[in-house]
Amino acid sequence: MTTTHAPARPIGKAAVGALGALAVATGALESVVTPTLPLLQRELDMSPAEGALLSIVLLVTGALITPIAGKLGDRYGGKRVVVRLMAVVCAGGLVSALAPNLPVLLLGQVLQGAMVGALPLSFILVRAHLPAGESKVAIGVVSGLFVGGAMAGTLAAGPVAEGLSRHWMFALPTFAVIGATVLVHRLMPHDPPRRPDGTGIDWPGLVLLSGTLVTLMLVLGLGADLVTQPLVLLGLVVLLAAFGTGWVAVERRAASPMVDLRMLTRPAVGKSCVLTFLICVGTSAATYLVPQLFAVPADTYGFGASATEIGFFLLPGALAASLAGPISGIGVRRLGSRAVVTAGVLLMAVGLLGLAAAHTEIWHLVVGKALVALANGLCVTAMVTRTATSVDLGDTGIATGLVLVTRVIGFAVGVQVTGAILTAGTPSGSKIPAESAFVAGFVLAAAVTVLSLLVVRTMSKGVKE
């Protein structure tokens, strides 16, 4: 017997405004680590590899939480799940604010990763309570406010960390998230649970994927340090293989898998995932290495930039990334996905090689980072659009989810590899990596990016295959 739910009660501008305030606050909280990473590394005595781990753990958690959040939203209603996830985010923000050392800060970032799963649910809430035309506008507004919050966090994190402390850098946006969550709870009406599909949550798949990603990060981050301990390194590699093999086996048999790997057999989806992985490996190098290079002391080959200055220097890249989505959408509609991805790959390769060849002036890094951010946005948006329009309507969420999970894995792998390169390139007794380590990181990222052209050549010109 099918249960019929009453339609969701329409919402007003105040409720949409509460979701917008939540987007601004979470965007600010998510973005504070990137411009202040060199400062955090100094204060917590982190190696480059440990700094790389800190910069990605939130995204990795988000990749694990997002598909589970969607299932829970269907089962219990979007508002209920959003409020509970944001409670976890607030707890994570407070843990990060009070963290005395790296392990506690990593725990805080893991908890903050729940925000990645909460944001898509806020879009579902808007669609549940507004007509189609109004919901599109509201989703655009909320998305734009999240980007605006991220830019504000990038600019404000440095001054707050230097003027007050790194603790307040996490605390202030967390207080904003708490306030916005209270507003959502008070102003947003409950949406009725949608009819469940009769299948449960893939907890074994979640556990095995978590183990796979954590072990992969350990292998990449500690590999250089474990060369002198080959048995430990071999043990981690064997554990990684066991987790990965177990996850694939479970996902192939699950009635409702967390990640439907069978979708990878479809050419459009499989190629999109491979391209997304390669492109995000390239992007991650600039994302991690450029702030580190800004912070290298000026009496060597760097600029001695403060956290405040780094946030200001990274702003053009954030603006370029925000423009990439609309530009990519127009380009795909007029020229096809292959043309947009090809242009993005070439632009990214130019930016990365430019950073490797010329990084003696601040504007070199600003322009290079902006080119890479623009190129990444062009490519990833085109890949998601291409994937979404190449499968049946009922498979859209599964297929695009695969691409987004691949994006996080590619970014995480790239950051950990570049962090390991800097660690290996740091002379004994020094905390400053050799300049050649930065060059090697940029060149390797460019090579991986160019490699993706081999896959681009096999794509059809249009969106569908």
Image (tube, rainbow, N blue to C red):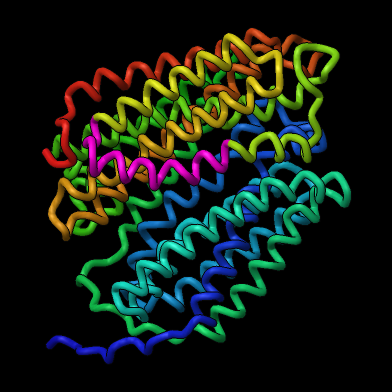
User: What residue is drawn where x is 20% and y is 89%?
Assistant: 4
Q: Which quadrant: the C terminus?
A: top left
Q: How many marks?
A: 0
Judged left or right of residue 445, residue 202 is left
Judged left or right of residue 309, residue 279 is left
Residue 96 in view (yes/no): yes
Is residue 329 highlighted in magenta? yes
Q: Which residues are magenta?
A: 317-338
The front one of 408 and 7 is: 7
Percent across and percent down for residue 172 are 75, 61
The front one of 126 and 137 is: 137
The front one of 75 and 295 is: 295
Residue ranking furthest to the front:
334
Percent across and percent down for residue 125 are 40, 74
User: What residue is drawn where x is 39% and y is 47%?
Assistant: 326
Residue 212 in view (yes/no): no
Q: Main secondary structure of the magenta part?
A: helix
User: What residue is drawn where x is 51% and y is 19%?
Assistant: 352
